[in-house]
Amino acid sequence: MIKKRQQAAKDYGITTNLDQALDSLGADSSAQALHLTRSLDEAIDTLGTSRAFKPPQPEEETIEATVRPAQGREDLESVYRLVHDAYVEQGYIEAQPDGRLLHNSDLDNIPETVVLLVEVDKHLLGTVSLTVDGQFGLPVDKDFKATCDVVRNDGRALAGVWRLVTRHGYVDERRLVMSLIGEVVRQAIEGGVQTCLCAVNTKHEHFYKRLLNMQAIAYCRAVKRFHNVPGVCMRCDVESLPEWWKR
């Protein structure tokens, strides 16, 4: 397991889930409250420069979080409920009677997939999933199959990153997001993956470009199963990762 430290604050602005957590990456953490920024581009710029992402500094971190793989059905059920609540709150789906969202659940119980959880005091606060390409394919195939096949034909070892969400109301969701992204990148590299593909809301395209030097390679005007949210397929090549990430 990997443990990461996170910044504490006595007062904080509530963020709803990953979408607002990403926006809050631009918050002024030295103030009494973490103030949300509405523009993702402005949020990224306030982290350092307009051209480079500035990683969190160790001396700022005080709350301990643990990132670990899901173990068994109980963990997966918790993930389904967390993702359901996040997607409903963001307006991607309607609330389900059982309070769960089984998003690409056919990929959950295969050896090619690892589901990561981030916890504080054993409370689930976020999750992300990584699936290595194989006979079951990748989650991003559902919306960008032709694009994925083009990348496959390059002969690179592929994986898909998906289902990245954080819980509503946690004091510092931005560090949960960074903990999850950091661990999923490490898992991919250690597993021999050369290229990761993911499908995200187009409003987060610039965030991933600046964070991991990812490239937008295809667009979808409307993802029907998520209330016609516009999507973008993004590509991350190991050799293109920024230098600060490799340290």
Image (tube, rainbow, N blue to C red):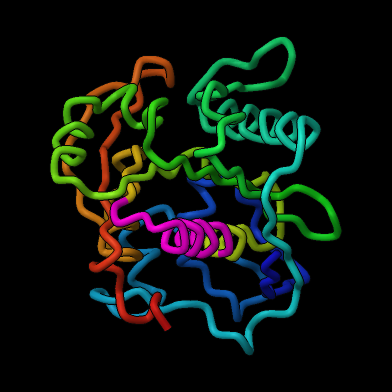
> Residue shown at 31%/27% (left/top)?
141
Q: Is 109 in front, or is 208?
A: 109
Q: Quadrant of residue 158?
A: top left
> How many numbered dots are placed on residues in this image?
0
Q: Is 76 in front, or is 95?
A: 76
The N terminus lies in quadrant: bottom right
Q: Is 42 in front, or is 82?
A: 82
> Residue shown at 46%/77% (left/top)?
55
Bounds of the magenta segment: 179-195
Q: Residue furthest bottom?
A: 59
Residue 72: x, y in percent? 76, 35
> Residue shown at 67%/68% (left/top)?
2
> Residue shown at 26%/37% (left/top)?
232
Residue 168: x, y in percent? 67, 44
Residue 182: x, y in percent? 50, 65
Q: Would residue 156 be found to the left or right of residue 246 on screen?
A: left
For the stretch drawn in magenta, the main secondary structure is helix
- Give the vertical position of 246 relative to 146 (above or below): below
Q: Would residue 244 be found to the left or right of residue 60 on screen?
A: left
- Give the vertical position of 4 relative to 112 (above or below): below
In the image, residue 208 lies in the stretch drawn in magenta:
no
The answer to whether any part of residue 36 appears in the image is no
The answer to whether any part of residue 119 appears in the image is yes
Q: Residue furthest right?
A: 121
Q: Would residue 84 be found to the left or right of residue 185 on screen?
A: right
